[in-house]
Amino acid sequence: MPILRNISQLATCPPGHSQEDAGLVSQAAVAWRDGTVRWVGPYQQMPAEFAGEPAVDCEHRLVVPGLVDCHTHLCFGGWRGDEFEARLRGASYQEIAAGGGGISRTVAATRGASLGELQRKAHAALEAILRLGVTTLECKSGYGLDEANELKQLEVYRRLDALQPIDLVPTFLGAHVVPPEHRKNRERYVDLLCDRLIPLVVRQGLARFCDVFVEEGAYTVDEARRILGTAKAHGLGLKVHAEQLSAGGGALLAAEMGAVSAEHLEYASDAAIEALAAAGTVAVSLPLASLYLGDRYLPAREMLKAGLRVAVATDFNPGSAPSYHLPLAMALACLNQSMTPQEVLMGATTVAARALSLQDRVGSLLPGYQADLAIIDAPTLSHWLYHFVPNACLHVLKNGRWVT
């Protein structure tokens, strides 16, 4: 039974704790067997049964649960660096989209890429993401927006889940925007989603969740309600892109439908925050998108005060958040959302796992959980998030096996 000892600070991140308490343990140790955590606690209190077991010296460093990135758009064709420059020159996200850029441009690039090309690109990103300490990652479709290409994206995720260590959680986002060929008859595309694509995705076992982008220029509340209702009837979990660029009613819809998460929420109202808290929906903060768009950040302090759990994720995509660096997103959540280091770490571990309905398996370092952890080159959690470096993660354990 391997033991990791001489841990300066261990963050256990229990799912039942308040978000401000990451379950920190000083001078700690962790034991695991067959990919599962068996014991955690102060080294001096380690049970005698572990004496003589092979040990790894952590050399007085921080250990955290394997990070959980609960919102990414991992598979896409092309990039949009010229749009980054256009925004710096004053163009808005909406203006770029109206001119043929934005999501629609990535849809064209993704449709034009082969499955193999998309798989190789996403695989390269996952290799770098793993080195940052991420061991579980949600990945959305939404850049195909027709049957063949939505299935192509989801098939990339199925293949990659078997080829590399990170656990992938696929989400069907066929309702990202209305594709160009259906804009004159939106109802026809909604019919396609509900009558054809959602049942097909479920039959083929390609997704665990369904997501809808509720926003001006994307989907209305009524359209989203129908799509989410169909997904729920077919057994998919529900997610909603809500209140990213304006207060469009998506957050209230997420609460109404019992969505596991509402994501973005930069423009969430007090009423929406209260409704989400009452529904038990997780708020997913995406500070990298706020950084790149130069827009407001999610009101984390108001949400936490209302009893709402706040996850922290990257929103990795080629337009509004072209970075998969979850530790950077965590630092931004501290600096721009006034979240404490413990709140942020909980948001990128057990709360993020809750946004994927996985909080009983990953996101915590407790007996019975998957042995997923990261060794961080810092003495404490506060020091890690305060002293930002390109990558402080030294080693990653996934399912009880060292993978970096």
Image (tube, grey):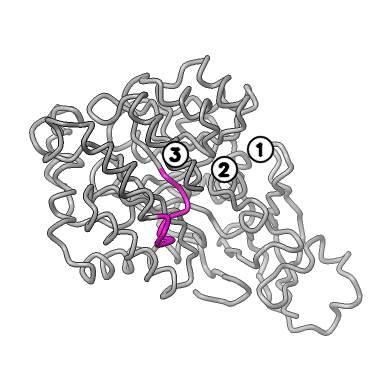
Q: Which mark is residue 379?
A: none
**Residues packed near mark 1 inside 10 Å, few (<14), some (14 to 19) or many (20 plus):** many
347 relative position to 286: left or right: right
| In the depicted structure, whether residue 50 falls above or below residue 237 | below
Question: Which image quarter: residue 193?
Answer: top left
Q: Position of residue 179 (x, y in %)?
A: 18, 40
- Of residues 252 and 15, the one nearer the viewer is 252
Residue holding disc 3: 332
Amino acid type at circle 1 is: Gln
Of labels 2 and 3, the one closer to you: 2
**At 55% across and 46% down in the image, what residue appears?**
352
Find the distance from the CA under tag 3 to the CA under tag 1: 17 Å
Q: Secondary structure at mark 3?
A: helix
**Residue contact at pointers 2 and 1, CB within 8 angstroms:** yes
Q: Position of residue 369 (x, y in %)?
A: 69, 62
**Residues packed near mark 2 inside 10 Å, few (<14), some (14 to 19) or many (20 plus):** many
Residue numbers of the magenta segment = 202-210
Q: Residue furthest front?
A: 195
Residue holding disc 2: 347
- Of residues 355 and 388, the one nearer the viewer is 355
**At 48% across and 71% down in the image, what residue appears?**
165
- Of residues 51 and 367, the one nearer the viewer is 367
The mark that comes first in sequence, 2 or 3, is 3
152 relative position to 337: left or right: left
| Magenta segment includes 344 | no
Q: Position of residue 149 (x, y in %)?
A: 22, 57
Q: Secondary structure at mark 1?
A: loop
